[in-house]
Amino acid sequence: QSALTQPASVSGSPGQSITISCTGTSSDIGGYDSVSWYQQHPGKVPKFLIYAVAKRPSGISDRFSGSKSGNTASLTISGLQVEDEADYYCSSFTSSITYVFGTGTKVTVL
Amino acid sequence: QLQLQESGPGLVKPSETLSLTCTVSGGSISSSSSSYHWGWIRQPPGKGLEWIGSTHYTGKTYYNPALESRLIISVDPSKSQFSLKLNSVTAADTAVYYCSRVADGVPADHWGQGALVTVSS
């Protein structure tokens, strides 16, 4: 199974909105509403941000939102803050009853 | 509060077997009503996340096809533990290994702290 494709980096200024894309195939993202997103600061454990494409676990800010169209999922961070600077990973359930992660996106707050 | 903790050797020689155990506390690994699975994810230094595989308390397992030939994931509900064994390791298997709780459609809604395993002679 191939990793989902994410842009290597995305940047924005404080207060702006940015969107990270995550592209897969009809065997993963396109076939299931089982896309999750994770935030990882350097040297830290990944943090669970989004599940089922657009749902937020308890305690996650509503500045983080998810969506999906066809084989591409997206994570939008609105009102960008300095502490949002981190690596972000998408994941999807697959038709092989496995999971696959994205290649990861480094978000830089300018 | 559910907690997961990895344990095992931090250094493994090439061609040998990497073995890790995850101990679950604050929740049952084998609740009769549980649809949760228990999984492993790894992250080589400076690289991205890779899903390794998962198991259910009944023993049913699911593996990453790229690792399946070298991989065994098992569960011991009586000890609230599940384990990973990866044989014939090489330097490419050097990574931080995380254990996780796998929810419906989610590879990890809870994570362990991670265990760095280095493959080197």
Image (spheres, coloured by chain):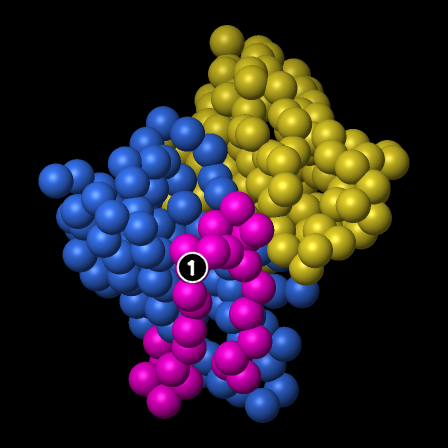
SS for callout 1: strand
- Seen in the picture, residue A94 relative to A14 is either above or below; the reply is below
* Chain A image colour: yellow
Which residue lies most toward the left here? B121
Which image quadrant for residue B73? bottom left
Q: Is residue B65 magenta?
A: yes
> Around disc 1, counting alpha carbons within 10 Å, would you say few (fewer than 14), some (14 to 19), or many (20 or more)?
many
- Of B43 and A90, nearer the camera is B43
Q: Point out residue B48 in the picture as x, y percentages from the top left corner.
A: 46, 33
Number of disc labels = 1
Q: In blue, which chain?
A: B
Which image quadrant for residue A28? top right
Q: Is residue B39 visible?
A: yes
What residue is shown with label 1?
B71
Is B24 left or right of A78, judged from the image as shown?
A: left
Q: Give the residues drawn in magenta, as a range.
A: B57-81
Q: Residue at x 73, y 35 (%)?
A: A24
Q: Point out residue B49 in the picture as x, y percentages from the top left corner.
A: 48, 40
Q: Quadrant of the N terminus of chain B?
A: bottom left
- Of B46 and B60, nearer the camera is B60
Q: Residue at x 31, y 50 (%)?
A: B88
Chain ID of residue with mark 1: B
Q: Is residue B91 magenta?
A: no
Is B103 left or right of B97, judged from the image as shown?
A: right
- Of B15 and B32, nearer the camera is B15
Q: Point out residue A94 in the picture as x, y percentages from the top left corner.
A: 71, 51
Q: Residue at x 50, y 56 (%)?
A: B68
Q: Point out residue B45 in the picture as x, y percentages from the top left corner.
A: 32, 32
Q: Quadrant of the C terminus of chain B?
A: top left
Q: Residue at x 50, y 16 (%)?
A: A108
